[in-house]
Amino acid sequence: MTWFSTVFQKNRRFASFGLAAVFFMLIAFSPNVIRPLVGNVCSSIFFYPFAELKNYILDLQHVSRENRSLQKQLTETSLQLDFLSEAKRENQRLREVIGFDPPENFRLVPVKIVTLRQEKYPIAAVINKGSLDSLTINQPVINRFGLVGKIREIMPDFATVTLLTDPSNAVSGRVTETREIGIVRFSAEKGMYLDNLPADSDIEPGNLVISSGLGGVYPAGLAVAIVDSVTAQRGDILKTVTLKPTVNFFEIDELYVLIGGNK
Amino acid sequence: MRIIPYILYLFLLAFHLTIFKQITSAYGGLIDLSVIMIALVALYRSETTTLWFAVCAAVIAGSPRLDMMPWELLMLVIPALVVNQISVRINLESITSRLIIVGGFLLVHQAFSALIISARDFFYLMYSSVLPTLIYSMIVAWIIFLFIDGRITWKKIKALF
């Protein structure tokens, strides 16, 4: 053993070269046993961690690309959904209009709002039809919820509608439950209210107020508002009645002009 | 304990071959890190260290293609020993002389690899792959030598910014 150690120490250089040569011979002339074994050992020790890391990074890149693609698809789908929802709402409105009966001797002319004049509340709307479509001044304008206003100005292709929220536009209203008549007015401070109702009236919150037909502008029976609150002080002659319009004037879009009547 | 840095070099080589090689490729040129690392060991370390580091590096470089493993052993170990002998016998003070040696090593490795992979397309490979790899790897080797010689230091880099 001592002899071997001495020889090895003295010929260390040649021993190294010899071992390397033997290793080379094994690698070169054993392509089916030693070479795959060495390759596998190297792969599992040195390459495996980095191969896993590489796969992880590639997976992340793939997920990132897929995420971008899905986000794009989601945006497109939500856009389509918005269009479809709008179409559904329009469809619903049109179905309701089909079942909507205009007052006797009247016919409906559908119009669209071009612009809405708004101060604190919307007070006037410009519609896309005018005298060329047989519209005239003072014709009532409604939507599926009730009375909206009347035509105030007329042009060949356009017309201006004064809404019930215009303080100058008062309507004669009738309380359906009590058959009493008052004047529906609007002011920025009070909102919509029923004027000229006697203090001994039996009107209650929740009663429906419709157009009375008096005055000759609006036909009778169009829904105008629902009674919101009723107050009367002792000694008052008239009751204070606040109303909630059946029409939401902030959301009006499709309107109908009532044409015909006794004329 | 003395072999730990060499094992880390081998891990670095495996990392380069697995991930970094493809990322850093440009105009058909790759960084031949195995040759650069073996040449550095051959220039600055003993003959036995060079021999065994070259054998290990060649085995790792040949692992992805087992049929090339004996060729890698030959093409990396023999030039490494030659470089080591040159560095022992000749005084290699200047960066240029070391770069010439590394360039020769790179040329031998790349040219023989191209010859073994496809002898018929040798000249095409020389133009499209070997020369870009040679230039690219020599630039990397030049930067490494600048670091080794202390011409580029972290302090100088920090001073620049």
Image (tube, rainbow, N blue to C red):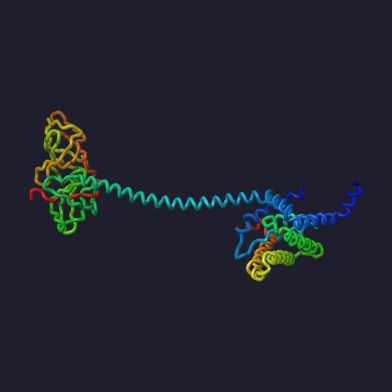
Please state which of residues A218 and A170 is positioned toward the viewer in this rendering. Answer: A218
- When asked about the image quadrant of residue A208, the answer is top left
Q: Residue furthest left?
A: A263
Name the side, left or right, on which A42 lies relative to A194: right
| Count of numbered circles on the image | 0
Q: Would residue B68 be visible to someone looking at this image?
A: yes
**Quadrant of the frame with the C terminus of chain B:** bottom right
- When asked about the image quadrant of residue A132, the answer is bottom left
Q: Residue furthest right?
A: A3
Please state which of residues A54 and B134 is positioned toward the viewer in this rendering. Answer: A54
x then y, percent, for residue A5: 88, 49
**Height in image: A28 above or below A164?**
below
Q: Would residue B150 be visible to someone looking at this image?
A: no
x then y, percent, for residue A116: 24, 51
x then y, percent, for residue B83: 77, 63
x then y, percent, for residue B64: 67, 56
Q: Residue furthest bottom?
A: B123
Name the side, left or right, on which B79 lies relative to B127: right
Q: Residue furthest top?
A: A234
- When asked about the image quadrant of residue B25, the answer is bottom right
- At x 33%, y 49%, the residue is A84
- At x 36%, y 49%, the residue is A81
Please state which of residues B79 and B139 is positioned toward the viewer in this rendering. Answer: B79
**Height in image: B19 above or below B133?**
above
